[in-house]
Image (cartoon, helix red, strand yellow):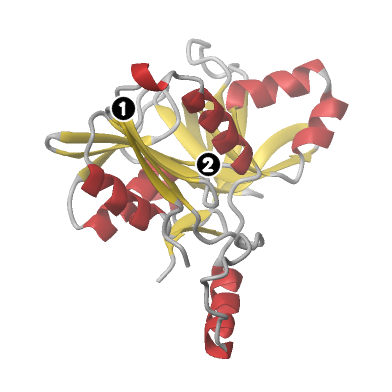
Amino acid sequence: MRFFDSLLLAGPLVLMTLAGCSRSRSDASPTAASAAPSASAASAGATADAMVGHPPDVDVTAADVLGAYETDAKAASARYRGKVALVYGPMGEVGNDDAKGAFVTFLKNADDPAPNAAALRCYLKAGEEAALGSRNRGDKMDAVGVIDEADGQIFLRNCVVDTQLKVCQLTTRVLGRGTCEAGKDKLGAVWTKSPDVVEIVCQSPGGFANWSKEWASIPKDRQTRTKASLDKTSCHAVLEAVNTKLVVDLTAALSRLRWMDNVPTLAP
């Protein structure tokens, strides 16, 4: 497995792009200098590929999902139903459905009063209720689940909440240092080890591509932050200052990120 393709130092900008594992995509063609893989290496690679779960198909705000169904339910169903979605927005209510189990809702608008506020239900994967114990209505939240429909209602099933915080905590475990907190105003989590502050996001390939375009649109002479971006795992980390060693460490850590049944986890 290659750990990174390039390291570009340009003034304050340090750019690192990882060519890591993908659930189904193959690596680029080997160079002439590359040795042919052994049978055991090929077998190990196949095993590693089998371990890689699907990253989210799409990342979207709860408001956008609800708005799409309100505008054109048929088109929205064709677009979203059955997709593994990374959804984020303000948290609503926590409850329990006799048939489907525990759930939490995403509000379309955090200012709408309960109980009639437009909301997207997220039926929780077993064990996820504990993550909501200290949360309050209106707090920003993210979850990964499968968008589904029944009885005229749209909802998420098999939901795993706070996935970005979980990614950050896995990164901390690999690095052996730092603390994590959920992002406040946007998707992601914040890793801190003084003096370094890092925003970490692992998302859908489409969301990652959009972020990459936004980053590339900033002229290099105006770029004051540093990134570690991993195109094949759709993860990126943005540092507030230049720290080349930390970029390398973050790249190695995030290269191990896998999605297994909607849960962020680490490859060996």
Dot 1 and dot 2 residues touching (CB under 8 Å)? no
Nearer to me, 59 or 237: 237
Q: From the viewer's perspective, tell me whether residue 71 is left or right of residue 155.
A: right
Helix, strand or loop for disc 2: loop
Location of residue 86 (image quadrant): top right
- Could you classify mark 1 by the number of other residues whose Cα lies within 10 Å: few (under 14), some (14-19), or many (20 or more)? some
Q: Which residue is mark 1?
A: 225
Three-letter amino acid code at the position of disc 2: Gln
Q: Which residue is mark 2?
A: 203
Determine if residue 151 is in view: yes
Above or below, 58 against 1 in this view is: above
Residue at position x 43%, y 18% in the image: 219
Q: Position of residue 11 (x, y in %)?
A: 28, 28
Nearer to me, 241 or 169: 241
Residue at position x 45%, y 31% in the image: 187
Nearer to me, 263 or 56: 56
Three-letter amino acid code at the position of disc 1: Arg
Q: Position of residue 165 (x, y in %)?
A: 36, 43
Helix, strand or loop for disc 1: loop
